Image: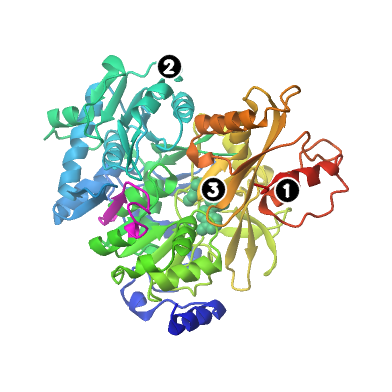
Amino acid sequence: MSQEEGSLEARLEEQETFEPPESFVEQANVADPDIYDEFANNWPDCWERAANLLSWDEPYDEMLVDDDAPFYEWFTGGKLNASYNCLDRHVEEGAKNRAAIKWEGELGETRTYTYGDLLHEVEAFAATLRELGVEEDDVVTLYMPMIPELPIAMLACARIGAPHSVVFAGFSADALATRMNSADSEYLVTCDGYYRRGDALDHLSKTEEGLEGVDHDVSDVVVVDRLGDDLEHSLGERQHDYDELVDEHAGASVDPVSRDAEDMLFLMYTSGTTGKPKGVKHTTGGYLAYTAWTSHAVLDLKPADTYWCSADIGWITGHSYIVYGPLALGTTTMMYEGTPDYPEKDRLWEIVEKNQVDVFYTAPTAIRAFMKWGTEYPEKHDLSSLRLLGTVGEPINPRAWKWYYQHIGNEECPIVDTWWQTETGGMMITTLPAINTMKPGSAGPPLPGISAKVVDSQGEEVDAGEAGYVTVDKPWPGMLRTLYDNDERFVEEYWEEYSDPDADEWVYFPEDGAKLDDDGYITILGRVDDVINVSGHRLGTMEIESAVVGVEGIAEAAVVGGDHDVKGEAVYVYAIPEEGYEDQEADLREAAEEAVLESIGPIARPEEIVFTPELPKTRSGKIMRRLLEDIASGNELGNTSTLRNPDVVEDIADQVGAD
Ligand code: WTA
């Protein structure tokens, strides 16, 4: 590092606040600080700003219906189609030849779909789905990696009013089956494989295995030929070839189905506190308006922009901010199939330079990996096309924030640290990039119109400087409407903690801890439930535990998250062998790891699996998870005298990190 660079870093290290650069403010979509008051003074009608970003077939009669809270309705009476909003209207407005999706495969091949091309292929696939028998409100499962056919299939579903349920391609066969069963989904779109670090991964066999676990008839499986080999037809008559069907239906015209604002656009399964994933339901009007609005106000997207969110479409971030938000605004959205270090660690920066990316949105875990790899990789490329940077998925530590600001943004791009969840549909707490001072590590104030607060266990707002829990005490258009087929669990999971149903006061509880500062900025501290966040991926510890205790020879297990330099958190498993299996630790460890991969997938691979004759328990028999977390994170252990079995703690601590 040169001396000049050294002093630059030292200067940034001391700096606690950063102002939006003038050059950014001048061109921003939203730059007037009065927007906070405008929304507050005109709530809920302020949300017409979001609705007005869409084209409605029929205008809504009511902004918000709250008679049956917490089952809220937004834009009631309005009708629209999401695929029309993301495609047709841009083509009608003359943007036929503007790039809608720019895709890059891991091996270097590229594809560009203009808005005209994309509409054409979406119509062809929508016609295909119809011919296969898909009707309005049938749930279509999409088990696909980062290939253009995934957003095409999503928009084709949206066009005919069939909700999609995308299952992350990295999830296991079992995870696919669980989700298809839960949604009673009879249609599946998948592919033969995809590339990871130069290797072709077999996705079709995994699909086949998953289908074996589906408890009802799956009538049709459409397979995209991604690898270009001869496609195997291992699924029998129900297997169809995507390319053939799309060719057959090329030129088809499929009118977008006019959907009620409250009709389901998609289902997205996410981890919760029990072993069973939750099917989060999002709607056509509220969700689309909210993702379009936040893409406009926070990501500052404009039709002329090339925008890249490096998440996977299999997670909510990709749904909201690769597909629906950016396409609703007519922007060019990038997709990259592979890993950031293939073939070299500068792959992302090469893509930014080559495509002149204007806005880049990624996860803190990726930034920490870039930091580790060193500045030489971004320095190889001209990143001056960038105007705005964003992060999402987990707390970002100030050091990583400053590295991103300096080495990717060249101190010229604001950074938005956006807090939100699968359930919220879109961003909730973040600075507005042209308005607010940035404070590295703190997400910022709630967005205009979002009534997020930090409260104590009684629901009272905490004072500045104190920590508590995030709550949201007013509804917003992008919110989940319920859990699929499970209204009861919806109320229990999100509304019971802080609401007062007798007074008809409803408070949404996201299960995150946070700290408030003097300026009303919220610093997110992390989950307060049994959900952990590995590399920005949300995993339920109960799901992992139930996989581990399914192994023959394992009697009991506790799974917790421990601090990890790059991943944020990593999975730690503590397990008790059954009697007679005590000397088979190596085999049990292997079997436990295998079970986790099988039931969830490689993202949940344990960092360590520690065997112990006992787990630390309170006198009432509750496993002391906090203590296990401290052990995993290498923290100083506090008082263990309240435990029934304090000795066991030291034995476990000795084992962790021993190898
Ligand atoms: C965490 C991802 C700190 C949080 C969009 C939340 C964050 C969970 C941030 C949701 C952030 C998300 N700062 N923590 N900017 N963004 N989280 O459903 O704990 O996959 O509850 O949605 O990620 O994860 P999910």
Distance CA(mark 1)–CA(mark 2): 41 Å
Front residue (pair 437, 254): 437
Which stretch is magenta? 329-348
State whether residue 22 is above or below residue 609: below
* Between marks 1 and 2 in the image, the one whose residue lies nearer the viewer: 1
Residues packed near mark 2 inside 10 Å, few (<14), some (14 to 19) or many (20 plus):
few
Query: Who comes first in sequence, dot 1 or dot 3?
Result: 3
Which amino acid type is shown beneath numbered disc 2?
Answer: His
Quadrant containing the N terminus in the rendered view = bottom left
Residue at x 49% of width, y 71% of height: 402
Which amino acid type is shown beneath numbered disc 3?
Answer: Val
The answer as to whether callout 3 falls within 8 Å of ligand 1 is no
In the image, residue 523 lies at what x, y percent? 59, 63
For residue 626, the mark is 1
Q: Is residue 347 magenta?
A: yes
Q: Which residue is mark 2?
A: 216
Distance CA(mark 2)–CA(mark 3): 33 Å
Magenta: main secondary structure equals: loop
The answer to whether residue 512 is left or right of residue 261 is right
Residue at x 36% of width, y 19% of height: 218
